[in-house]
Amino acid sequence: MNSFSFTTTKTLINEAGSLQALATHCQNLGIQRPLIVTDQGIVGAGLLGKLESVIEASPLKHAIYADVIADPPESIVHAALEVAKHHNADGVIGFGGGSSMDTAKLIALLANSDEQLSDIYGVDQVKGKRLPLILIPTTAGTGSEVTAVAIITTGETTKAGVVSPVLLPDVALLDAELTLGLPPHVTAATGIDAMVHAIEAYTSAHKKNPYSDMLAKEALRLMGDNIVTAVQDGSNLEARQNMLLGACMAGQAFANAPVAAVHALAYPLGGHFHIPHGLSNSLVLPHVLRFNASAAAALYAELCDVLLPGSNLNSDSEKTDALVQYLEDLIKTVGLPATLKEAGVTEESLETLASDAMLQQRLLINNPREVSESDALSIYQAAF
Ligand SMILES: NC(=O)c1ccc[n+]([C@@H]2O[C@H](COP(=O)([O-])OP(=O)(O)OC[C@H]3O[C@@H](n4cnc5c(N)ncnc54)[C@H](O)[C@@H]3O)[C@@H](O)[C@H]2O)c1
Ligand SMILES: [Fe+2]
């Protein structure tokens, strides 16, 4: 077995209704003046009002930055930081999907240290300490509440990550009541993203380890059993809590055994066509797995046993085919477009996408099979 290290969020609360204890968690961390970082979708869904009523019943003095946008650019981080400084915030609450949580992570750091955002991109460039930080996911997707990463859009088509254990929050609250109103297409796309986190962690080339394996398998079991119910019957609290926990476990897995070619080929789709992160992953997922099969069939077979127990299949290659078929069927059942064409991607762009995917070496090195630019192009062509 490889040597490995494993890092995660110190305190996880997996409980429907746990938002009600938010003020207590703030007080336990010494927070008196929190900044809440969120977006207008959360405001529109009535969730910010719910959070504010919990805070207003306590002695906390809060301020709000509610203008995060999906795939947040640097300007959003700077604007939220101004609000944090103006309020003299002594703690940060990230409330929303990955976009709001990632922004909150950076504000907790930058409001407490003189570092500039432009100096901290990359791995372990952060020097300062952050303010106390609580993350509350409202999508069952990115797992940002347990990852040491914040992803920011840095140019027209480029993203960059700040990677540092400082960005792990003190507390993550997994409260499925907050996800009951998540629209079906967002539930589907963010749920498939989380399943990809588990699949790619399980085949991660260098850092896969017994903890990440255990979490990836249980994450897939939970999400495989619940994603269709969560999409088709959004008010099912049990399915929603299982999805939230599954996405969190998948986040713990990939935070320690990083994702690979599915994500590397998904990023250019988001960059060029503004396709949401989860849908981008879903569009290339079956095709990357087919490409990887020659190197990863034994591992895919183990995941087939998790998602399709009692399948009565014997060989690794039969089980890999069954896994890919299961995922293709699932993508259809949850109502996501199955081809790049349906998602608005143009055929002329495929070469540019393939060349951009090659820039994601940080991810591609984790893939079980080496991916060349012509391989990437073939995968996009198959997905078209
Ligand atoms: N930090 C990490 O480890 C990590 C990992 C993967 C992706 N990311 C980043 O996370 C971002 C994507 O996050 P996401 O997929 O969670 O989407 P998101 O945060 O961009 O949210 C998507 C939309 O869903 C809405 N929404 C969220 N929760 C809702 C709810 N409960 N009810 C109604 N509407 C709701 C939001 O308002 C928003 O409009 C990207 O920027 C991506 O790069 C980060
Ligand atoms: Fe992802």
Image: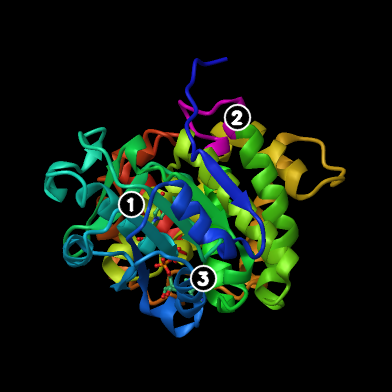
* Residue 35 relative to residue 95: left or right: left
The stretch of residues the image draws in magenta is: 200-212
Which element type, helix, strand or loop, lies under badge 2? helix
Q: Quadrant of the C terminus?
A: bottom left
**Residue of label 2:** 211
Q: Vertically, is 42 above or below 131?
A: below
x and y percentages locating residue 151 in the rendered image: 31, 53
**Residue of label 3:** 54
**Residue of label 1:** 105
Which element type, helix, strand or loop, lies under badge 1? helix
Q: Quadrant of the N terminus?
A: top right
Between 355 and 266, the residue placed more toward the observer is 266
Q: Residue at x 52, y 76 (%)?
A: 50
Q: Vertically, is 285 above or below 250?
A: below
Q: Is residue 202 magenta?
A: yes
Note whether ligand 1 is within 8 Å of mark 1: yes
